[in-house]
Amino acid sequence: MTAVVDPNKRRALGRGLDALLPARPATAVERAYFLCALEKLVPQKGQPRRHFDPKALDELADTIRAHGVLEPIVVRKLAGDRFEIIAGERRWRACQRAGLREVPVIVKDTPEADVFELALVENAQREDLNAVELAEALDRLVKERGYTQDALAARLGKDRSTISNSLRLLRLPVRVRDRVLTGELSEGHARSLLGLADSQIDAVAEKVIRGKLSVRATEAIVRAARTKKATVKDASPDGKTPAIRDLEAKLTRALGTKVLVRDQGNRGEVAIPYADLDALDRLIDKLL
């Protein structure tokens, strides 16, 4: 049987939700608190959470069977006798798995334009969102509502650096972001991959997944790739590093003739061309 919490003693939904709702007495609709049939509830279109882990839902369903629904689902009234979920879709899905027919709800008189933002705040307060889901939701608010990163930080009660670092995850290719959503890659893996050039991320992500590599191992791969890139960048058009070219210059000055150093993996040769026998004699005198 569903456990219904006394509406006068129910737990708060989080400082974020209350902060975004108008500071005014609740309307008659907003005071509505009742048991609602599950089939009358509909998910919010485009809500921040995109991935629901089946195992986690089963675990929540077991908890609901044992203890009931300890916190009501927040909804808004739609046409007819249907309600759109603002906060609590995961609970709604778990209730279906638990075999419940009805669930406690609170009705909020919320404008459609504010529904997505309220859902994001609720999920962010609970830290329920995957790192990519949060990044995509923040990006949507920036584009649709014109928020700056400072404004988002204030509304979510987070540091600006947290918002900025979250949005950086959108640099990942879509295929890699999907792997983070499904849990094949962790947030730590994702942040490590950001150290790579865009063209390298997809291939390294596949390598990490196939090898089931740890975050630390992934960081090592990224460091190696960055070092290799720096070495190639520092090399001259003929493939010689600044150190080799400097050595050639010193030998050329010392011997008075062009000296070539060919290095391959710390092995190689020193070549000293000469124009004629007189030049060879002068070179031999200097060497001996």
Image (cartoon, rainbow, N blue to C red):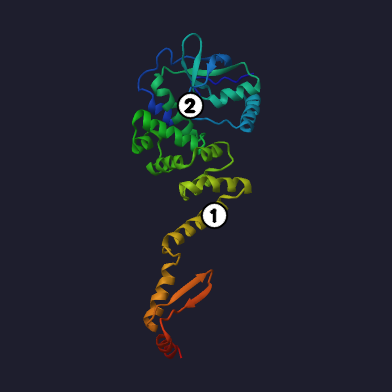
**Label 2's element?**
loop
**Label 1's element?**
helix
Looking at the image, is mark 1 or mark 2 earlier in the sequence? Answer: 2
x and y, in percent, of residue 202 in the image: 53, 44
Is residue 46 in view?
Answer: yes
Residue, x 55% and y 18% (percent of image)?
104
Image quarter of the N terminus = top right
Distance CA(mark 1)–CA(mark 2): 35 Å
Question: Which residue matches tag 1?
Answer: 221
Which quadrant of the view contains residue 109? top left
| Rendered view: 96 above or below 278 | above
x and y, in percent, of residue 146 in the image: 33, 31
x and y, in percent, of residue 231 in the image: 46, 62
Q: Is residue 269 left or right of residue 254?
A: right
Residue, x 46% and y 13% (percent of image)?
78
20 or 241, nearer to the observer: 241
x and y, in percent, of residue 139 in the image: 41, 34
Question: Which residue matches tag 2?
Answer: 47
Residue, x 43% and y 23% (percent of image)?
115
The amino acid type of the residue labelled 2 equals Gln
**Mark 1 touches mark 2? (CB < 8 Å):** no
